[in-house]
Image (spheres, rainbow, N blue to C red):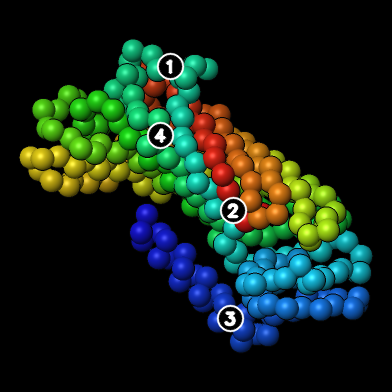
Amino acid sequence: MKRLLFTALIFITTGVVFAQSKGIDSVKNTADTTKKGVGIKLGYGDDASEININKNRDTVTGHHSQYPHFSFGITLARLDLGFATLIDKGSFTLRQQNQFLSYRAWKTSNVGFDVLQMGARFSDAFKLYLSAGFDWTNIRLRDPVTILPNQPVLTAVPTTLHLTKNRFSSSYLRLPLSFDFRTKEDASGKRFHIVVGPEGGFLLTASVKQISTENGKQKVNDTYNYATFRYGGFARIGYGAWGIFAKYYANNMFENSPQQDGLRNFSFGIMLGF
């Protein structure tokens, strides 16, 4: 995860230097505009992603050309911080064969964000865009088991280690297609957003991290039979920059593992950055 974050920061920094060198730092306006604050636009198009620092409410950005407006660029948006939940054949209760995946609910998390985006705004109220980013799910296992790497099916064995942490994680490259509906700006310059759409994802890596009194910290990377490609849908609702999200993946969490057939991933929480 640290390597991916470092890579994302390199891309963002490179994009800032490129954007500044090309002079991509303005939005076309024909109305009178008062701007107080600092803005950096990364990408191409009138509707490209923009990072604003200390942007006051009297900043006016107007489009008077005909729609659609196209954009492409680097972004840092839709930061998800939430909880992950396993759904087993439509139930939140795990079946007997999946009890080794019992988890601590308040320590099982989902984190993600987008770093690239391309899209088109068809009106002031509607935008369609495809983005790319990273998504992590960290399952904090409750029972003293070790999930084994390099197995034909998902396999766990009991352990006698005194574990203080037993985390089962996966990371995906996420590719959400967003249908973004928003209201007009209110008196404070903010809008309500409703965003829905499908999402696909490609497995990057998975790992088991254990901390025990006997062996200290140990981490093993593998695929652990996680689905190579996952697909599902998401919804985001919010006001201004903040909101809530929910994501559900429709295919099995694990592939080539008949005992885990019907096991799905559902996440929900808060988000920052529409």
- Identify residue type, mark 2: Leu
**In the rendered structure, which disc, 1 or 2, sits on the residue that comes first in sequence?**
1
> Could you tell me which secondary element the residue under label 4 belongs to?
helix
Mark 3 touches mark 4? (CB < 8 Å) = no
Residue furthest to the front = 187
Q: Which mark is residue 106?
A: 4
Q: Is residue 71 above or below residue 30?
A: above
> Could you tell me which secondary element the residue under label 2 belongs to?
strand
Q: Position of residue 262 (x, y in %)?
A: 47, 20
**Residue shown at 68% from the left, 77% from the top:** 37
Image quadrant where one finds the C terminus: bottom right
**In the rendered structure, which disc, 1 or 4, sits on the residue that comes first in sequence?**
1
**Residue shown at 61% from the left, 87% from the top:** 21
Give the alpha-carbon distance from disc 3 to disc 4, as whole Å. Answer: 42 Å
**In the rendered structure, which disc, 1 or 3, sits on the residue that comes first in sequence?**
3
- Comparing 136 with 187, the one in front is 187
Q: Position of residue 258 (x, y in %)?
A: 38, 19
Give the alpha-carbon distance from disc 1 to disc 2, as whole Å. Answer: 31 Å
Residue 88 shown left or right of residue 218 in the figure: right
Q: Is residue 88 above or below residue 103?
A: above
Give the alpha-carbon distance from disc 4 to disc 2, as whole Å. Answer: 20 Å
- Identify residue type, mark 3: Phe
Q: Which residue is mark 1?
A: 93
Q: Is residue 259 above or below residue 29?
A: above
- Identify residue type, mark 4: Trp
Tell which tag, 1 or 4, sits nearer the viewer. 4
Residue 37 visible (yes or no): yes
Image quadrant where one finds the N terminus: bottom left
Residue 17 shown left or right of residue 171 in the figure: right
**Residue shown at 78% from the left, 75% from the top:** 27
Q: Position of residue 236 (x, y in %)?
A: 66, 42
Q: Which residue is mark 2?
A: 272
